[in-house]
Image (cartoon, rainbow, N blue to C red):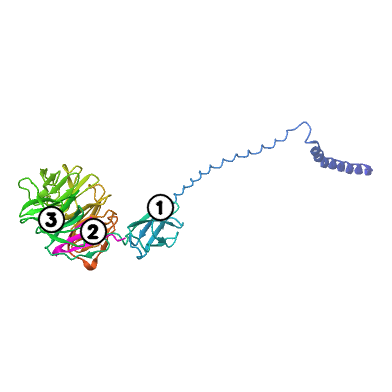
Amino acid sequence: MSKNTGSSVSSDQSWLKLYAAVAVLPLALAACGGGGGGGDAPAPAPAPAPVPTPSPAPTPPAPAPTPTPAPAPSASLSVAASSTAATPGGAAITLTATVTNSSATPTWTLTGPGTLSASSGTTVQYTPPATATANATATISVALTGATTQTVTISVNGTGAAGLAWTNVPVTSIGDLAAVDYANSRWVALGASGAALTSTDGVTWTSATGFSGTAGARVLAHSGNTFVAAGQTGLSGFIATSTNGTTWTPASLPAGTGIIYGLIAGAHWIAFGDVGHVYSSTDGSTWSSLTTLGTPTGAPPVGAMTAGAYGNGNYVAVGTNGYIAFSADGVAWQDGVVVMDSSNHGINMNGITWTGTQFVAVGDNGAITTSTNGTSWSALRTSAISGTLNAVATSTSGEIVIVGANGIETSTDGITWVSRDPAGAADLVAVAFGNNEFVAVGQASALKTSVVTP
């Protein structure tokens, strides 16, 4: 038998060494960054996927425009008075201010006589003076920040003003009195039957012959020291002149002149007959015809022009059916306006006066209208007495007196009217001012006076 002991040991050790080498090889390769030359190179690592570029965010919508707030409403102010006429020592007048769109407080000021209860607030009281010897005006203003100042004018009727207190004067009865006027230092009142009364003081009256025959007066006026009376003899017109009211001289009239209803003493004399007939005279004694008044389109026919006035260089006449005519010279007359009632019917107009600043015309059913120029007329004012208003006159201090079938009313502005003499009401048809007093006459020889007291 052969001996193999040494070879067996060497063979086992060789396998161990090979195993160890094989086991170490990957570690060595890893440490060297890979194997040496020979064999395929490992596949390159795949390129990383590109990072997607995000889409841009959508542009947000533009913000809605901020609305412009509406401007705040403007402040406004109005004022109302419980009355616009006062008497010395009389009742207080309440004034109320209405404020809109403002929290401010109104302030008040007074110009003229009397007192205010406060200088601020929405309501104040006006107290008229205790006494006054002449008419006056109180102007009350109310102001508010951001608003237009408002004013109220209050007429204070002085206790001494003519027209406020009236006295019945007993006279010799001569029937119905139709006209009255003052000139040449005397009063003259004429009766519808032709009789007359005269007075130098308005207190004591003397009957006079008046017109001869059957003449009767409807209207009386004066220019300078000359009275001119007009009316009728039967159905014919009649005009006469006088300087004393007792002796009358008939005037010369155009043939066929009808009844004369109205007179105007202006730069020259104007007389009015029926159906629009107009006559002119430079002296009141000799008269000529003018062009007959026309009828406004759509208006009732022109009837009798019953009264007239001269003021600010203009002539204005009023008559039946609400007709009012205007002339700048007394010769050429414009087609007039017509005063209507609420039913669009012409109102008979009976009297007119010039106050120094405006014409005031009066008529049936308490009609009162005013005009500063004689062509544009106000809406009807509110009368303090009812029924027919027959005549109107103005004092030198501006007191306006209206007489009518149911008494007397007065005003200082032609807007606000106050009833006077309610206990002594009579059917009065004419009124005039002279020698610091009013005289009113009417039916059944009624005669009243109102004087200026010191």
Which stretch appears magenta?
430-454
Please tell me whether mark 2 sits on a helix, a strand or a loop: strand
- Decide: few, some or many residues near mark 1? Use Cα within 10 Å; few <14, some 14-19, many ≥20: some
Q: Which mark is residue 246?
A: 3
User: Measuring 44% from the left and 49% from the top, which residue is drawn there?
Assistant: 71
Horizontal and vertical percent for residue 375? 22, 47
- Residue 425 visible in image: yes
Q: Which residue is mark 1?
A: 149
Residue 232, quarter of picture:
bottom left
- Decide: few, some or many residues near mark 3? Use Cα within 10 Å; few <14, some 14-19, many ≥20: some
Please tell me whether mark 1 sits on a helix, a strand or a loop: loop
Do the numbered discs 2 and 3 sit on residues whose CB atoms are within 8 Å? no
Horizontal and vertical percent for residue 313? 23, 44
Do the numbered discs 3 and 1 sit on residues whose CB atoms are within 8 Å? no
User: Measuring 49% from the left and 47% from the top, which residue is drawn there?
Assistant: 66
Residue 195 magenta? no
Q: Which residue is mark 2?
A: 438
Horizontal and vertical percent for residue 376? 24, 48
- Decide: few, some or many residues near mark 2? Use Cα within 10 Å; few <14, some 14-19, many ≥20: many
